[in-house]
Amino acid sequence: LVLEKGLGMNLHDTLIDIPSGVAIKMSQALAKNEGIFTGVSGGASMWAAVQIARKAPEGSVIVTILPDTAERYLSTPLFSKINSDMSEDEYEIARSTPSWILDPPAPAVEQKSGLSMLCCGRK
């Protein structure tokens, strides 16, 4: 209902139909190539911005908003092809940031009480 009322006010310049699948592909490309972690609606927004940019005069400024993060999509097909474990090369890059080392957690250490304690890898 809110969408219909907003469209009825004719405040928009144009509407862009988003073809099936392109929002997911753009979201994946943003994560892989740009390090921008956005969901499906963010992928759709960026895809539309790219379409506008292709037709815009040289020197135009195009602004788009990526309205969500991808946290809720981690267990969905959006990111199913991304390996959740880091490779040795990725660990090497992570270790190059002295203020935040992303080493894997140390193995659980058994205490005398029979409880286990998990140590973090932050140095």
Image (cartoon, rainbow, N blue to C red):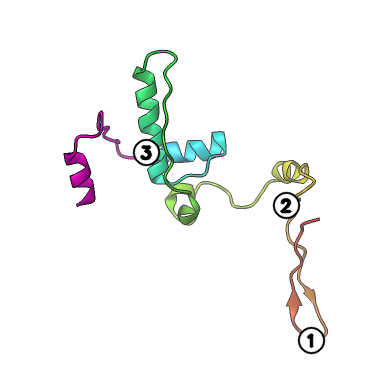
Kind of residue at disc 1: Ser
* Residue 94 lies in quadrant: top right
Assign a secondary structure to mark 1: loop
Inter-mark Cα distance, 2 to 1: 29 Å
Assign a secondary structure to mark 2: loop
Q: Looking at the magenta stretch, what is its main secondary structure?
A: loop
For the view shown, which residue lies furthest in the bottom direction? 113
* Residue stretch rendered in magenta on the structure: 1-22
Image coordinates for residue 53, horizontal then vertical, percent: 39, 22
For residue 113, the mark is 1
Q: Nearer the viewer, mark 1 or mark 3?
A: 3
In the rendered view, tell whether residue 75 sits above or below residue 14: below
Kind of residue at disc 2: Leu
In the rendered view, tell whether residue 114 sits above or below residue 20: below
Image coordinates for residue 89, horizontal then vertical, percent: 72, 41
Inter-mark Cα distance, 2 to 3: 32 Å
Q: Which residue in the protein does label 3 denote?
A: 44
Q: Which residue in the protein does label 2 denote?
A: 102
Q: Is residue 47 a member of the stretch shown in magenta?
A: no
Quadrant occupied by the C terminus: bottom right
Q: Earlier in the sequence, mark 1 or mark 3?
A: 3
Q: Residues within 10 Å of mark 3 (few under 14, many from 20)?
A: many
Q: Earlier in the sequence, mark 2 or mark 1?
A: 2
With 67 as the anchor, is 35 left or right in this view?
right
